[in-house]
């Protein structure tokens, strides 16, 4: 039976992933193995795992006004904000629809991550979920013992001059065993399609970030040109919980 945690205060509540400061029966487990911030007026769904002995974060909403509907559905509240019932996780630019627990505590989930960045030179840069400088959790970070099938759509357009644009598509599989350095793209590599491109040297690559344990979308723009990039990363995820 899921429980609802509702932040009625004016500050942000932080659910720390498997924090040693809490007793074993009162800890939180998040699917991305990272802390979750619950802002004022927001809620999260928690389900207690009696076998593992901790609460699993299994859903949430982007607003205090929860949308009505069935578990696992993508919903909007009356204000037009994306909300989630049990099994739907929203976090800024990310959306995950979580499936059922399978035998052996294996999780299944479909994800949609929106990455972006503005480039001003021909130096390659990684797109991030907040469009800001790269850090430890603003890419598609894989948890330990997981496999992600991905389909990535990337669009780019020059902002200071009309008419220069490009679009790319990637398909492949990424996995992570134990530890950030184990992230890799499976044998066979990534299938890349240049969907459309005007006469520009811009390029995109999908690669493993073994420092942060993430899957990276790396873009290369052009010197002295302001280019806006956006990527939609669709994933089908399987993870064995520990």
Image (cartoon, helix red, strand yellow):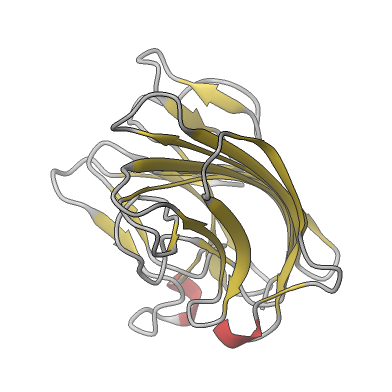
Residue at left offset 37%, top offset 78%: 22
Residue at left offset 76%, top offset 61%: 190
Left or right of 124? Residue 85 is right
Point out the residue furthest to the left here. 10
| Looking at the image, residue 44 lies above or below residue 67 | below
Q: Quadrant of residue 81?
A: top left
Residue 146: give x, y in percent of width and height.
71, 70
Which is nearer the eye, 136 or 48? Answer: 136
Judge whether residue 227 can be spotted in this image: yes
Point out the residue furthest to the top here. 78
Residue 209: give x, y in percent of width and height.
55, 75
Left or right of 102? Residue 137 is left
Residue 185: give x, y in percent of width and height.
73, 71
Which is nearer the eye, 169 or 221? Answer: 221
Q: Quadrant of residue 85?
A: top right
Image quadrant where one finds the C terminus:
bottom right
Residue 147: give x, y in percent of width and height.
75, 66
Residue at left offset 28%, top offset 32%: 160
Left or right of 51? Residue 45 is left
Q: How many marks?
A: 0
Point out the residue furthest to the front here. 199
Residue at left offset 22%, top offset 41%: 40
Left or right of 182? Residue 78 is left
Judge whether residue 179 can be spotted in this image: no
| Looking at the image, residue 126 lies above or below residue 78 | below
């Amino acid at each position: 039976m899921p429980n609802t945690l509702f932040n009625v205060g004016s500050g942000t509540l932080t659910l720390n992933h498997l924090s040693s400061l809490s007793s074993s029966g009162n800890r939180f487990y998040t699917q991305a193995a990272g802390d979750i911030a619950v802002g004022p007026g927001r809620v999260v769904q928690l389900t207690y795992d009696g076998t593992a002995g901790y609460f699993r974060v299994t859903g949430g909403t982007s607003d205090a006004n929860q949308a009505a509907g069935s578990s696992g559905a993508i919903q909007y509240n009356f204000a037009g904000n994306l909300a989630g019932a049990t099994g739907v996780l929203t976090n800024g630019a990310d959306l995950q629809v979580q499936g059922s627990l399978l035998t052996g505590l294996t999780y299944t989930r479909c994800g949609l991550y929106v990455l972006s960045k503005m480039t001003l030179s021909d130096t390659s840069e990684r797109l991030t979920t907040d469009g800001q400088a790269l850090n430890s959790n603003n890419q598609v970070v894989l948890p330990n013992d997981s496999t992600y099938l991905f389909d990535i759509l990337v669009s780019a357009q020059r902002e200071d001059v009309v008419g220069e644009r490009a679009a790319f598509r990637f398909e492949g599989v990424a996995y992570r065993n134990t530890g950030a350095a184990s992230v890799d793209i499976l044998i066979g590599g990534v299938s890349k399609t240049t969907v459309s491109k005007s006469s520009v040297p811009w390029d995109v690559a999908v690669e493993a970030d073994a420092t942060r344990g993430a899957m990276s979308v790396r873009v290369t723009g052009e010197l002295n040109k302001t280019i806006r990039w956006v990527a939609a990363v669709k994933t089908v995820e399987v993870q064995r919980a520990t």
